[in-house]
Image (spheres, rainbow, N blue to C red):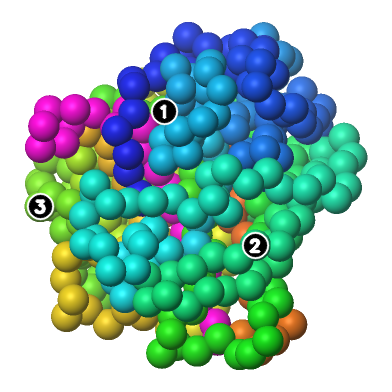
Amino acid sequence: MIVFLLTVSQSAKSVSFESDLALLKKHFAPIVLESGYSKLIVVGELQGRVMVSTFGDQHGQSIGWINRDYLKNEHLDYSSGAGGASRLYFGPETGPFSFFFKPNTTQTGDNVVVPDAFSSIPYDLVFQSKHYVKFNKEIKIQNYSGYEFEVEIEREIELFSRENINRQLGLVIPETISSVGFGVLTKITNRGKRKWSFSEGVPSIWELSAFEPSDKTTVVIPFRGKLRPLKDYFTPLEHSHLRVLDGRVYYKADANYLNKIGIAPENTLPVFGSYDAENNLLTIVKFQFDVKQQHYNIAFWNDKTIDPYEGDVINVFNDGLDADGKRFGSFYELESLSSAKALNDQESNHHFQNVFHFSGSKEHLNKVAVSLLGVSLATIENVFNK
């Protein structure tokens, strides 16, 4: 998660989907996808980014964190974070093959530069229907070692029907639960003249979903095998925000402690989520993962001893005050990365991340949590009381 100093934005707890749509129409041409009562806003000018979703009609509450104070003005500061419920970056974040630092600069927060491909270049609309949209863009992007990649990006966003949600999750969501789900599939193709090389750096597809925090939001990450020690991104891992119990990592996403955790490939299961007990909102993320792939780009700062391809698959970012007492925007993020592949000319790699939100009857919501995360809402809600 590349972080930037932001103006604290108005909370979505008091913002409707209709209000966010009106805001985005001031400077963009937002696309609204619809399926039944659920809706989704996508902005092509922001690289085919999913902004917010909602369960109900346009007067319903927005789900997702966007930087409303920034977005009410024209998008001119490309280093600012606009947020969004699903946005695209390329990994690695740091190290010799980073895409976020110019060659021959020191890799510090002050020198971070978000490439135009993920900040200022609009993606071209290829196809649009009521519940699906596809974008395309050919870009050139240079890494820290100076190698320039020629890449075609294809980005597909689908708002799922209730039947599709049931089918993908293997459940029958009862009518007592409101639901909205969407999927983002990104495909990258090597359009250069030669094969990509691990020795020069290989990009991975990095999908980041920003959401509103609360004092009672807990991320749940089921894992397999013996858990590899978690890295302390940015700040030390604290007992106040981290628990590891019964094959699950629990992480407090309250935006009150600047921190980040990651799950290694050998521990990864392709599902995780969060529960906001304050607002009775359950979020599930399912993503593409192949246990046979082992090359994952790092996002760990200031450690040159780490192999650049021994990175994590899942990342969770928690906002908080920095060393100067300033906040980055008051959000948390659920992120997944594709493996890095040394593609031949015209060869492709792809990655999907699907996001589902549920709210309603706590009894029925609990069954969804147990089915998908293997743990009850009561356990999630009380894990940090122990």
3D distance between C-alphas at marks 3 and 1: 23 Å
Instruction: Give me the disc on residue 236.
Output: 3
- Residue 32, percent from left and from top: 76, 28
Kind of residue indicated by mark 3:
Pro
Which is more toward the observer, 194 or 361? 194
Q: Is residue 218 left or right of residue 199?
A: left
- Residue 378, percent from left and from top: 33, 35
On whether residue 236 falls in the magenta region, the answer is no
Q: Is residue 97 visible?
A: no
Q: Is residue 60 left or right of residue 32?
A: left
Q: Which residues are magenta?
A: 321-342
Kind of residue indicated by mark 2:
Ile
Snapshot quadrant of residue 69: top left
Residue 138, relative to residue 78: is it above or below?
A: below
Per the image, label 2 sits on a secondary structure element best described as strand
Q: Earlier in the sequence, mark 3 or mark 1?
A: 1
3D distance between C-alphas at marks 2 and 3: 37 Å
- Residue 5, percent from left and from top: 29, 33
User: Closer to the observer: label 2 or label 3?
Assistant: 2
Please name the residue shown 85% across and 50% down the image.
126
How many residues crowd mark 2 within 10 Å: few (<14), some (14–19), many (20+)? some
Q: Is residue 265 left or right of residue 237?
A: right
